[in-house]
Amino acid sequence: MYAKISLLKISTWTITGLFAVPLLVVFASMANFDTQVWSHLLSTVMGSYVLNSLVLAIGVGLGTAVIGTYLAWFMVNYVFYGKSLLNWLILLPLAMPAYIIAYTYTGMLDFSGPLQQFLRTLFDAPFNQQMLPDIRSLEGAVLVMILVLYPYVYLLARTAFSEQSAQFTLVSKLAGLSRFQHMKQVALPLARPSIITGAALAMMEAMADYGTVAYFGINTFTTGIYRTWFGMGNATAASQLATMLCLVVFVLLWIEKSSRKHHSRYQSRHAGSIKAKTTTPLKSAGLFVLCAIPAVFGFIIPFIQLMWWSAQYFDKGVFIDYLPLLGTSLKLAFISAALIVSLALVISYCKRRFASRKIALASQFVGLGYALPGVVIAVGVVQVSGAVDININRFTLAFFDWQPGLIMSGSIAILIFAYAVRYLSVAMHNTDTGLERIKPNVDEVSASLGVNTAQTLQRVHIPLLRASLVSAFILVFVDVLKELPATLILRPFNVNTLAVKTFELASDERLIDAALPAVSIVIAGLLPVIFLTMSLEKRRK
Amino acid sequence: MNTNQVNLPVLSIQDLSISYGAEPVLSNINLAIQKADIACILGPSGSGKTSLLRAIAGFIEVANGSIDINGQRMSDSNSIKPPNKRSVGVVFQDFALFPHLTVQQNIEFGLGKLSRDDKQATAMKYMHIMGIAALAHKYPADLSGGQQQRVAIARAVAPQPDILLMDEAFSSLDPTLREQVARDVREIIQQLGLTAILVTHDQQEAFAFADKIAVVANGFLQQFSSAYDLYHEPTSYFVAKFIGEGAFIEGQTVERTKGWFAKTALGEMRLSGDDYSHTPTVKILLRPDDVLHDDASPTKAVIKEKHFRGAFIRYELSLSPSNEKVLCFAPSHHDHSIGSSFGIRAEVEHVISF
């Protein structure tokens, strides 16, 4: 038997408790409605927040579902030239944050950009003629987000299609169904839960986005939260907006969960692999082009443009700024990733050790952090740190007649805390599945040999978990490096990251100067994509 | 049966060879199955038995030879009719029920050309026959293994195929249920007057289900006959070893006035063939029930292993001086310990030798 109270349990409860506070603070704001502020919001901007956010989410959901599904269908069912290249290419947009692709396309397609000038020369149009629809619009935002978010659907749909028993194809053949009929009647309905899950994830990302919509000047919930807070100076109303955004996210989460629930129904027990069909050279070329298009627009073109700008135009001034910027970003991401992975390991290990429902539920609640937009977490964290600071100052004033000022607010620690709230579940997902792969009797063997819990973790689990820990670290590292809205709100004065600098330069229309920090983020973002592709390749073999 | 009709087999396979790439999987298969026959293709894993079934269904091409169904050419080295034009139904190993369709929708799946009402009526009819009418609106995930199998069979037979093919259709069921289910299914198939072929690696399943069994091994059809004949009249060394339990002992052939005999460690045995002048030694098959416990016998055998089976004990014995192994079922009151020996005698009515 294990001791009822252990250090492991205490630390797990402390971590989950601490992480739950900012989330609870945001939700608690609903208790306190300011009618004046709300009647103002409702009569002015609220309608456009709701409408724009909905259009954005639905557009992105539909677009990613269509693109991700057709890519997955062709990649699973056909053999064609260049397919192994596409295995890599299709996933690359995962490395491209939406706000970066957004400003890259703005630069390329702008009124005075190269493409419009070229078109004007081509058609001999006057210099003030608008040659292309404005990318800085709601439609534009939907489009750029589809381009970087379709891999969510693709990954899940591809697994769903390739896991379908090959015997289903035979049953359809016996019934005389064509390939297209089989897709319509069998393959698509079977893959539907996976497609919906992927689309729901993409919609959550779209709802959470701040950088793109802020740059395009579109009113959505996230920009609304930011403005209500910093423009109207009303933290409570900002929290209430955030809670409403959370409700939408919860609906999406619920959709995702419930479509996963029936997953077992849709899985085949005995999965003989589906045989891909060979194609004629002409068809092969057609399929290659069709499957390459999303990646070309979602990664290749913007990446080349960014590289071009970085190489051609950055001036010395920007470069001198760049190195400390890079240093700060890397340090911040490194410390956060190390801390977050350690905390995740403690919680996962505790879950394994005690198999307690309460601990599992608590860690699930904390895991919500990843589903919530960075802006919402920032709102929660700022309020918590503010309240703590106020109370510390009251306490010291009363007892020692002295005020230390702000301790928590505006510190690096609070920024890292916000990162941890947001990305703990990313790390935990890796540590959980890693620990699941280690047989439970390993723990029992270790205990029977007289080794205690902490030593077992150190001597047995951590060495066995190395791969999971590395991938957790890389994922969190890159997520922190890319993070924009929470960093923008919570960073201490004079602390700048690549993401914030990119956004600031782009917002100042210094698009070319923004290219170097932007391209750094993209290149770092390639790391987890490479890992993902390699592990998928291994699984397929 | 209509005696006026020419007795054309439903399925006729001639000189069939199947290969994957350059590698031959099956060679020179000849097989004829009559209407309403319930047959079985039995073989160890990797024997090519499933390839044979897939070739009959039209899922794979044949390298040589031909497959005819009701006298019509289905497959040969030049051409192949698609599966939906061959009038075959298939029950797959894991049933391959569509998880997103209800039981009824699954059964209607193969009834493409019928009207809505006819589809429903046909599905209803077969659900009643299979005893699953109450499950019509359930999904496969909510069914037990046995129920899923009934749905799979109903789906396969609803389009009224000429031949029902079943790929290891019982092997995913609980072993305690398997034989009973195989017998139940056999009864239904007989009622429907269907011609059925089961592919399996399990002898007990094959015995319980089929009238005639085709043993396939090492890429060849070894023997096609009843279960009784496979056991008592195996025509190849492989079948003798594969079907049932048994052991082989060596014998020297000698000609006596009454015919040819084999001199073995268990005495002389009458051989069934006419001429052994060119085979000085033969291997003789001894089933465990051919070897009797007999304290009076001068031939003693040493016990190497014993397994208590309730009514009897299965002894593995070693003969001296040849060290040949034989099996013996002795009534369980003849309890001897390993290492000791007892007297045995062979009583073989019909000697099988190779």
Image: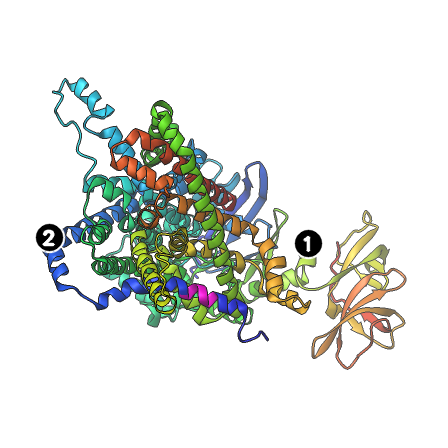
Q: Is residue A328 magenta?
A: no
Which residue is pictured at 37% across the width and 47% down the height?
B85
Query: Could you tell me which residue is drawn at 73 percent across and 65 percent down?
Result: B287
Front residue of B348 and A290: A290
As drawn, B219 above or below A25 = above
Q: Is residue A130 left or right of residue B234?
A: left
Residue B125 visible to the viewer: yes
The answer for which chain carries disc 2 is: A
Question: Is the residue A315 above or below the residue B267 in the image?
Answer: above
* Magenta-drawn segment: A12-17
Q: Is residue B215 visible?
A: no
Q: Chain of mark 1?
A: B
Residue found at the far left of this picture:
A43
Instruction: Please tell me the numbered disc located at residue B238.
Output: 1
Magenta stretch, main secondary structure class: helix
Picture quarter with the N terminus of chain B: bottom left
Q: Which mark is nearer the camera, 2 or 1?
A: 2
The residue identified by callout 2 is: A44
